[in-house]
Amino acid sequence: MLEMKKLTKRIGKVNPLSLQSALDAGAYEQFKKALNTDRIDLFQEIEDSKLRGRGGAGFPVHIKMMAIAKETDDEKYLVCNADEGEPGNFKDRYLLEKDPHLMLEGILISAYIVRAKKGYIYIRGEYNQAIAIVSWALDELKQKGLLGENILGTEMSFDLEVRRGAGSYVVGEEYAMLESIEGKSGRTRVKPPFPTEKGLFGKPTLINNVETFANLPLIMEEGGLNFAKIGTTTSTGTKLISLSGNIINPGVYEVPFGVTLRDVIDTLGGGVGVGRHIKMVQLGGACGPIIPEMMLDMKIDFDRFEDFESKTGAGAIIVMDDRQDLFQVLSRIVEFFNHESCGRCTPCREGHEHVSILMKKFLRSEGTPEDLYSLESLARVMHQTSLCGLGQSSPVSILSSLGYFRDEYHERMNMTGGSVRG
Ligand SMILES: Cc1cc2nc3c(=O)[nH]c(=O)nc-3n(C[C@H](O)[C@H](O)[C@H](O)COP(=O)(O)O)c2cc1C
Ligand code: SF4
C-alpha cells in the first residue's frame, strides 16, 4: 500500500470536538506513560527515531531538545508553529481540524521532556475553524486536568494558549514568530543566538511544526528504533503531502518517505486530466524548485531537496499541466514574495522589485540576453545574501527554472533589444 496511515489513522474515527472521543481512541496514553518515565529514556527514543522537523528545514528534533534540556534556566517555552502560510501547503490544517489531540499530546510529551512551563500554538489567522477547534480542545484538556497546574497530580505544570496570526507569511519563520508572540512586529532576528538558547522573552524555547509534534506519540508507542524502520535512512517515518494543482484527486496523503513523486501524483492523485500531460511540478510550495516531468521518479526525501539548494521539505506537490505558462507562474510567485517581504534587508527588498520587472519582460516575450544574465545573477545574490529564509528561498523557483526550462527563456526573448528597466 502506498498510503501509510499513522498520523492520520484516527481521522474520520474521532470527533475533533470531543476529548472523550480521542481518549476512547487511545489519545494521551503515551503522555501518561511518559510522565512516569525518566526523561533520558524518552529522549533516547526520539534520538533513535531520527525524527526531523516537518515544517521545512528538516532539522533533527533530538538536537534541539537536548540543547534546551541542558539549559539550566527555570523559565523555558515551547512554540508550535501552525502558521502554514506557504502557498500549496494545507497538511497542518488537516491535522488541526481533524485530530487536534494528536499534536496536543506530542506538545505535552515535549514540554515534559524539556521542562517547559508555558507554550503557544501560533495558528495562521485565516484558519478560523482550526483556531476554534484547538481552542475548544485546550478548554477540555484544562477541565480534565491534562493542562495547567500539577497535571494529573504530578509535579508537571504547563499552560498552553492559542495565538492567532495576522496574515503575514514571514511570521512563519521562527524568529519572526517569536517577535510576534512578544507583541512586536513580525520580523526576523539576527542569529545566533538560536531559540534553544535565547528564544521567547530571551529564554530557551523549543519551536516545532504541527506535524513534528504529532509524530511524538507514535514514536513513544512504537519505540524509536521501530519508527526509524519506515522511510529512508536519513528521512524516517511518514510524510503528509499536500497535493494540489492540475490533478484529478487533490488532497492530503500520508506516505512513507522514499516513495516517488510519480507514485503520489499518478497512483494517489489520479494523474492529470485525460488528454493532458504534466509540464512541471513545484515541490515544497511557492518557494520550492520547479522540476520537469522527467524528474518525477525522484524519491521524497529531505536530502534530495537539498540538492536543489532548497530546504522546502514541508511536503507540498503542485502539479502543472501543459496549459500552464511558466512565466505566468513565476510572475505570480515573485509578486507574492515581493508583497510578503518585510523590507528589512536590501537583497530581498530591492531584489524582488527588480526580478519582478525582469520576469514581466519575459512574460511579454520582451526579454533580452542581458535580462537573462541580470535575472540569474540577481536571483543568486538574493538566495545567498538575504537575511532570512524568505529572501533565501523565494528565488529557488527561478533558479530551478533557469536550469530545467532555459529553452523557454530563449523562446521569450526579443532579440531586437530592450533594457533591464523595462
Ligand atoms: C519565510 C519562512 C516561513 C516559514 N513558515 C513556516 C510555517 O508556516 N510553518 C512551519 O512549521 N515552519 C515554517 N518555517 C520554518 C520555521 O522557521 C522553523 O524552521 C520551523 O518552525 C521549525 O520546526 P520543525 O523543525 O518542526 O520543522 C518557515 C521558515 C521561513 C524562512
Ligand atoms: S529576507 Fe526578506 S523577509 Fe527576510 S528579513 Fe530580509 S527583507 Fe525581511
Image: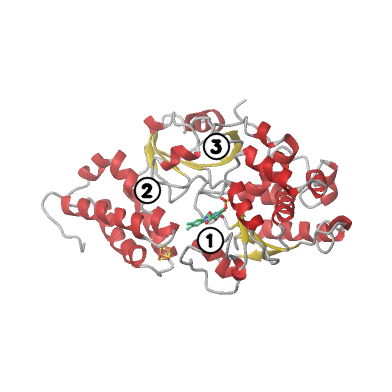
Q: Nearer the viewer, mark 2 or mark 3?
A: 3
Between marks 2 and 1, how big is the CA–CA gap?
Answer: 28 Å
Reading the image, the residue beneath label 1 is: 194
Reading the image, the residue beneath label 3 is: 235
Q: Secondary structure at mark 1?
A: loop
| Label 2 packing within 10 angstroms: few (<14), some (14-19), many (20+) | many
Q: Are marks 2 and 3 in contact (CB under 8 Å)?
A: no
Asked whether mark 2 lies closer than 8 Å to ligand 1, one says no
Between marks 1 and 3, how big is the CA–CA gap?
Answer: 24 Å
Question: How far across and down, in percent of the image, does residue 312 sit?
Answer: 47, 47
Q: Nearer the viewer, mark 2 or mark 1?
A: 1
Image disc number at residue 397: 2
User: Can residue 253 be seen by looking at this rendering?
Assistant: no
Q: Secondary structure at mark 3?
A: loop
Q: Residue drawn 64% across and 38% down?
A: 49
| Figure quadrant of the C terminus | bottom left
Image disc number at residue 72: none
Q: Residue drawn 59% across and 52% down?
A: 64
Question: How far across and down, in percent of the image, does residue 211 sit?
Answer: 63, 47
Between marks 2 and 3, how big is the CA–CA gap?
Answer: 23 Å
| Figure quadrant of the N terminus | top right
Q: Are marks 1 and 3 in contact (CB under 8 Å)?
A: no
Q: Amino acid at mark 2?
A: Ser
